[in-house]
């Protein structure tokens, strides 16, 4: 493992020199380390690049680490990871991707994850994205997530883009059975001329299923962001989509939330707000001795927390 990989791992997956439990480290398209546990089996896919991860029914309190790193340009890393979570399991998955290039060539990671949660399974999925390095090479991260929740299953996704990613297209689709629930919390910052697009498309198929999509973003410099969400209520269900964005300097944001209800008891709602930092917030912090720039940073940090 090289020093760049180690630095990226510390930033995106809380790496402290080693991982405990089940893990797979991906470095420049190859496996740089792997370990299964008695309850969690990690294997290579037989039909392409990526992993198949099986979690035994009833597994409790374990973590799975699956970070991926690209450490130089001229790499376009594509990986397919499938997660099969047994009934009544309750685990945490720590993913994360770091992309680095200093050599003028583009570097990209494209992770395609499929989740299959059996009845009553619960998963908390945490993912951080980071781009580092100087030069003209673009740093790109394009995650795709496909979610299938059986009855009474629960998946919580906490996704963060820390910074330095020139281009990102983030696609999430989901199908929910009866009484299952999906919660997505996205936090995103773009600067300079960076571009980011988020697409959500979730179908609430089962009775009393529910989804909560929350996006917080800040667009600085000349960066551009797009947020698109569609919640499809096809049974008695609840769905909520919320997009809050802050503009700074010459940043721009387009938010397009949509709802489709085809059942009389589908309760769906969406909210979207885009604007600059409130002047009274800055004024209050400046009375405490902060400069204009320091006040703005404090507000942004709190907004994205």
Image (tube, rainbow, N blue to C red):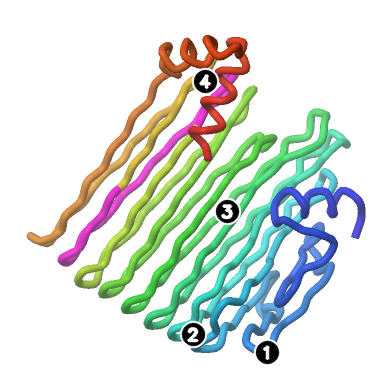
What residue is shown with label 3? 143
Is 248 left, or right, of 80 in this rendering?
left
Which comes before the other along the chain, label 3 or label 1?
Answer: 1
Per the rendered image, the range of residues in magenta is 218-240
For marks 3 and 1, give the one nearer the viewer: 1
Does the magenta run of residues contain 229? yes
Residue 264 position within the rendered picture, expressed as x and y whole percent measured from the top left: 7, 60
The residue labelled by disc 2 is 86
Residue at the spot of label 4: 251
- Mark 1 or 4, nearer chain start: 1
Q: Residues within 10 Å of mark 3 (few under 14, many from 20)?
A: many
The picture quadrant where one finds residue 266 is bottom left
Do the numbered discs 1 and 2 sit on residues whose CB atoms are within 8 Å? no
Residue 123 in picture, x, y percent from top left = 49, 70
Mark 2 → mark 3, Cα distance in angstroms = 24 Å
Residue found at x 50% / y 77%: 90
Magenta span has 106? no
Residue under pointer 1: 38
Q: Main secondary structure of the magenta part?
A: strand
Of badges 1 and 2, the one in the foreground is: 1
């Amino acid at each position: 493992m090289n020093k760049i990989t180690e630095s990226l791992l510390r930033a995106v997956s809380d790496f402290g020199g080693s991982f405990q439990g089940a893990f797979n480290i991906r470095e420049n398209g190859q496996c740089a380390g792997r370990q299964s546990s008695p309850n969690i089996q990690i294997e290579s896919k037989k039909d392409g690049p990526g992993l198949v991860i099986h979690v035994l029914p009833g597994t409790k309190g374990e973590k799975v680490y699956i970070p991926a790193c690209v450490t130089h340009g001229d790499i376009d890393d594509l990986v397919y990871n499938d997660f099969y979570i047994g009934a009544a399991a309750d685990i945490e998955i720590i993913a994360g991707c770091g992309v680095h290039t200093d050599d003028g060539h583009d570097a990209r990671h494209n992770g395609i994850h499929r989740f299959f949660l059996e009845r009553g399974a619960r998963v908390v999925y945490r993912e951080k994205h980071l781009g580092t390095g100087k030069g003209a090479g673009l740093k790109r991260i394009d995650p795709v997530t496909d979610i299938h929740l059986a009855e009474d299953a629960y998946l919580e996704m906490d996704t963060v883009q820390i910074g330095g990613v020139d281009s990102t297209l983030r696609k999430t689709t989901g199908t929910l059975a009866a009484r299952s629930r999906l919660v997505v919390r996205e936090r995103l910052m773009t600067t300079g001329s960076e571009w980011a697009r988020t697409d959500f498309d979730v179908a609430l198929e089962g009775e009393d299923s529910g989804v909560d999509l929350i996006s917080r973003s800040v667009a600085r410099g000349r960066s551009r962001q797009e947020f698109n969400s569609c919640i499809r209520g096809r049974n008695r269900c609840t769905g909520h989509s919320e997009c809050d964005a802050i503009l700074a300097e010459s940043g721009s944001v387009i938010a397009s939330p949509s709802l489709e209800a085809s059942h009389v008891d589908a309760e769906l709602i969406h909210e979207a707000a885009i604007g600059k930092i409130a002047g009274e917030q800055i004024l209050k912090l400046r009375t405490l001795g902060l400069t204009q720039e320091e006040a703005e940073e404090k507000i942004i940090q709190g907004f994205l927390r």
